[in-house]
Structures are given as C-alpha cells and as structure tokens.
Image (cartoon, grey):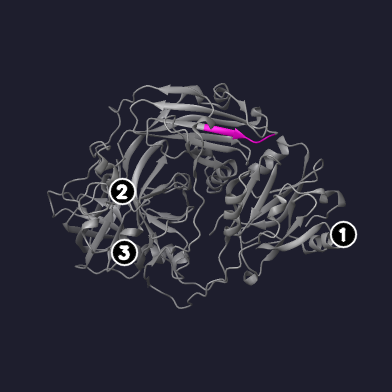
Amino acid sequence: MTGISIRRWAGALTAVAAMLAGCGGGSSDAASTAKTQPITSVDSRVQPASAVQDVASVKSRSANAAPKAAVVALGELSLSKVDTSSSIGPRLVGQARDIAATKSAAETQTQWQWKDTAVGGKVAAISFRSEGAYGVRLGVLVKQLPGSAILRVYTQATPGSVYQISGQEILQLIERNQAAGDKTDQGRTWWTPDTGEGEATLEVELPPGVAVSTLDIAVPQLSHIFVNLSLPTEQEYQAQVATTKVNESDPCNLDATCYSENATERNAVARMSFVSGGLSYLCTGTLLNDGNSSGKPYFLSANHCISTQTAASTLQTNWFYRSPTCNSGTLQSTSIRKTGGAQLLYASSSTDMSFMLLNDTPPVGAVYAGWDANTVISGTSVTGLHHPSGDLLKISFGKVNSQTSCQSSAGNQFQCNGATGNFYQVTWSQGTTEGGSSGSALFQNGRVVGTLYGGAAVCTNRALSDYYGRFDVAYNAALKNWLAATPTSGSRTAVYRFFNAKTGAHFYTANAAERDFVIRTYPDFSYENVAFYAYPDSSTGKDPVFRFFNATSGAHFYSGSTAERDFVIANFPQFKYETISWYAQSAAGNGASPMYRFYNSKSGAHFYTINAAERDFVIQTYKDFQYEGAMYYAWTAAQ
C-alpha cells in the first residue's frame, strides 16, 4: 500500500452527506455450507421474495426535463435481401442499418445540442428514427466516456419514462468484452435496449467539469426490428386498445399455461433477444440451480445462439412470458424484462451449449431449474418448454429415440447420424419447435437433460426429429466446475456506487439496505450500479477494507491498509472509524483486479475505480487528480 500524507485528509471524493454517517457498512451474510459429495442431479429452487433485487433501470421524470433532440432519420428498410425463411436456429428479427450522420465521434459531436444542467454539467440528445421498424436498438460505439456520465434511452412519444445507465457500467461491459479477446469496435459497442417503436432517443448527461470535447462516442449502426414482437396484455385486450396479435407460432404448438406438467419449470424459462453484428435474434434460455442452491443466476442456452462474450453482453430476457389463462392469446401482466446482459462462462459446439451468468438478478418467483447429469436412455418421455418464433411459452411432449452425432454445415444447417454421440434424437407426440426455440431445455422428470440444437420437426409430420445437446456430456466436460456442489467459504458480494453531481462526491457500499436507503432518501445521489465485487466477511481469508466518516466535511474514506487505518485513527480525530466495508486482497492474484486511487490536490478528495479505461480518462481529463496507483485488489465479476 502507498504511504499517506496529512494533506490527503482534507476530504474524500467518495463523500456522502453527513447524515449518512452510521448508516451501516458491508454485508455480514454468512457463507453457505456446501455439500462435499459428488452429485449428478439437483432439484429446482424458487427465487424468494427476500432475494436482493436490482435497482430499477427505468426511471420516471417530467417530460419537460428531456432536452430538445437532434433528429437522424433513416428511410424504409428493404427486406428483399434479408433471409427470414429459416425455421431452425435463432430467429432473425432485426437487421443492421448503417447511420452516416453519426458514424464517427466527430460527426456525432455535430449532432449534439448541448445545454447546461442545474448542477453545472451538460446534456444533449439525438433522436434516431428508422421508418417501418417495430423496435430499435442503437449500437453506441464508446472510445472515451466519463464513468459518472448518465446515458438515457427513451422515445419521443414517452420522454418521461427513460432507461438510465451510468458510464461506468458501460465501461465495465466493454472491459469484459475486451478481456474475452474482442478488441474490435463491436467489443466497444453498447447496444441499447429495444424501444419497441421505430424511434429511439439517446440522451447523454455529462457531470460538471467534463468538457464535451472529451466525449468520444458514436452511433454508426442500429438494429432495425422488422418483426412485431409485442403482444397485448390481458388488460389491454379487454380494453380493446391492442392491435391484432402477430408473430403467432404454428398452430400445433401447445400453450404451456394449459398444462399442469412442468408448471414449476416454466418459471425457469426466458425468451432471449440479443444482437450479433447488428443483427437481432430470438432464442430461448433456462435458469439453472447449482449444487449449493447459491442463487447465482446461471443461464443455459445454445452455442449457436450466443457463443461470444460480446453477444452475451447484449442479452435481454423476458420472464414469465406466457399467457395468464389457457389459450388467451395475451401476455400476462406480470411478465418482466431484464436488460443487463450476461457473463459468458462456457460455450461449445460439441454439445451446442452456451452457459452464462446473468448480470441481472432473476425476478421473485423465477425458478432455478433442477438438472440431471445422468444419460437419458432411449424411450424416455421428455418435455420441451420454449418460445417458438418468440411467441408465448409453449410446451411439447415426446420421447428420446436415441443418441446421435451431429455436425454443422453451411447455411445454418447440420447433419446427424449414428446411434452414439453428444446429442439426443427426440420426436414429439404433441407440439413441435420452431426458430426461436433454439437453446430451450429438454426436461425429464422436471430436470434439464439437454438443450435444443435444431431439427426438422413440424406440425404436419410427427416422424421428423429434433436434436438436443446432451447435458450430461457438457456437465462432465465443464459445467460441473460451476454447478457441482463444492465446499465454499463464501460468495462475492456487489459493491454499489453513487455519484453526487453537486459535490463531485462518490459513495460506495456493499450493503443493499444502505443502497436502497440512499436511493430513497438522497435524490442528489445518482445510482451508478455495481462498481465491483468483493467478499462480505472474513471467512475467505481476504483483507478488510475500512471505512471512515469525516464529521467536518461529511465525507467517507476507504482504505485497504491496516497501517493507514491506524495512522488515521491516531492522528485525525475528525475521522470517525465506522466499519469494515468489505474484504478484498492486498496483492494481485485469484483473478482480482487493481483498485486505482487518485488524490485531488485542490479538494483533498480521493477517487477510486477498478476500471482501467476510467482510470485513464481521469488521468487525461482531471489534471487536479494525482494518480496514486493500486490500493488493493477486488473483482470485476460475481463469479
């Protein structure tokens, strides 16, 4: 750890209002005790109401708060060259469109119409219109962005309801893509959530002290959703405000709500949408339990859907995406969309499986599906739960005929043959699958035993087969590293970050209750989401990070050094030692990343970030901040 000097104790950039003193420190949840015996199957678990939920990313504000937006308009998209005929694989629903007006940062800068904010920053917006689109996702290419910038996405029709994300969260996404090996512009692109309309407005708010010239972002591309993916809720249908239902799957598909079979497991299935190369797709995925029932949101789908971290970062999931009553043809009102993407843990073409850890917390009532890593014998009855063509949840009933070997070929095709291999051949007695069903789980006695690769099954021919990657093969190859019950002394906990634009102060807490208290009580503090991950208690053998409160300045200070803690206690009585906030490492290793610290010679403030891009932005932009190097080491991911 670096040494300290008296001048550094005038305050800290990690300040919070004086009334926050004594709000509490890090989480003290006890680590779970894991089983130690090898396992080959687990049962499901339900997400309890007590599970800590994410802070809502959709905010309400006065419609008058939206700045006047420049307009970039694209004409009607010609679909004549878009191949939408395939009934297997991911369902293509969105086409990439280049945007000449904002293809570079320099050209994008000419579109912004900056105006001052109440706290002394800058804000501007650009409205992108793609004629004929049922939805729009903007590809925002980020090369330089302040971590405390706020980006908002909304439509001009509803400027009072905005999706909001901090710059530091986007920087984390980019860092994760690059760490996985994607150094291209696609790896540096943040894809905005689908607006559900043919227009999307991107708004950027810069914090005080940041010149607009330091912003280096562009929107060279958008994904034009050419399929109407919306469905009326039951209330909309009854009020007769919904349009005629579109995107309906083939008629032999069975509404999952009509059947008691797998009623629990259907709450584990989510409709997926994601972007790859500017193209938008639909698939199906399933939430999985692990041997410790830890509540980590492991998510299983197909490798031919998501095989890269860059694609996983664009993932959106729709939960409880089914009808409220049998064959109502409407969407139940409790359906929830999550937009936070995922961390790709494993992807393999040998079983066509993609295994991820969701960045979002699954909603209350979602089911972590059980699984069975034993081989399924021929003749076994099985069930499929899936979203064919992106439709409401459907169920299929059939049997495993045999094992087989499958190889991919050109044009999203594949061939399967033989009576051994890494796939199951399945035929259906009721129901079928379609494009969009890809990646969906095959259930046997309520446990996952495979994921859908593809096939020729159709309503008109029951003899044709579908093919599922064998879960047991993937489990023994890699998934057991995450899903098997293992001894553990604790799981990492999220450390949340806030920014007060009026004071330039950041605040960090590992306590979700304190996070929610700050959000509820101090509107000047803008929530910037998870900053990094650490451990909540000492059972892991990690080093404590200490928190102080300065009664004079109303500032909090964080230190990972016992010597620094003791020095402050002995020499600066205005600093009240509060608590151990979390546990990290004093040295590199175990996948930990350095926590960088800066000192502001004018204000006496300190600033901390685990993100190298944000570190470089501060060095380049804020000349009053002296870089002090790494103070301790924490983690950029929960797993």
Q: Disc 3 vs disc 2: which is toward the camera?
A: 3
Reply yes or no: does residue 206 show up in magenta: yes
Residues under numbered marks 3 and 2 in contact, where contact means CB atoms less than 8 Å apart: no
Q: CA distance from mark 3 to mark 2?
A: 34 Å
Amino acid type, label 2: Ser
- The residue carrying pointer 1 sits among few (fewer than 14), some (14 to 19) or many (20 or more) residues within 10 Å by Cα, namely few
Q: Main secondary structure of the magenta part?
A: strand
Q: Earlier in the sequence, mark 3 or mark 2?
A: 3
Q: Earlier in the sequence, mark 2 or mark 1?
A: 2
At mark 3, the secondary structure is loop
- Residue 634 seen anywhere in this rendered image of the structure: yes
Q: Residue at x 41, y 38 (%)?
A: 194
Q: Earlier in the sequence, mark 3 or mark 1?
A: 3
Residues under numbered marks 3 and 1 in contact, where contact means CB atoms less than 8 Å apart: no
At mark 2, the secondary structure is strand
Instruction: Estimate the x, y position of residue 198 in percent, counting from the top left.
Output: 37, 30
Q: Disc 2 vs disc 1: which is toward the camera?
A: 1
Instruction: Estimate the x, y position of residue 67 in percent, counting from the top left.
Output: 54, 28
Position of residue 17 in the picture relative to residue 67 (left or right) = right
**Is residue 453 positioned above or below 294 on the image?**
above
Residue under label 2: 408
Amino acid type, label 3: Thr
Amino acid type, label 1: Asn
Instruction: Estimate the x, y position of residue 126 in percent, counting from the top left.
Output: 50, 27
Magenta residues (range): 203-208
Residue under label 1: 571
Residue under label 3: 264
Q: CA distance from mark 3 to mark 1?
A: 59 Å
Who is closer to the viewer here, 604 or 411?
A: 604
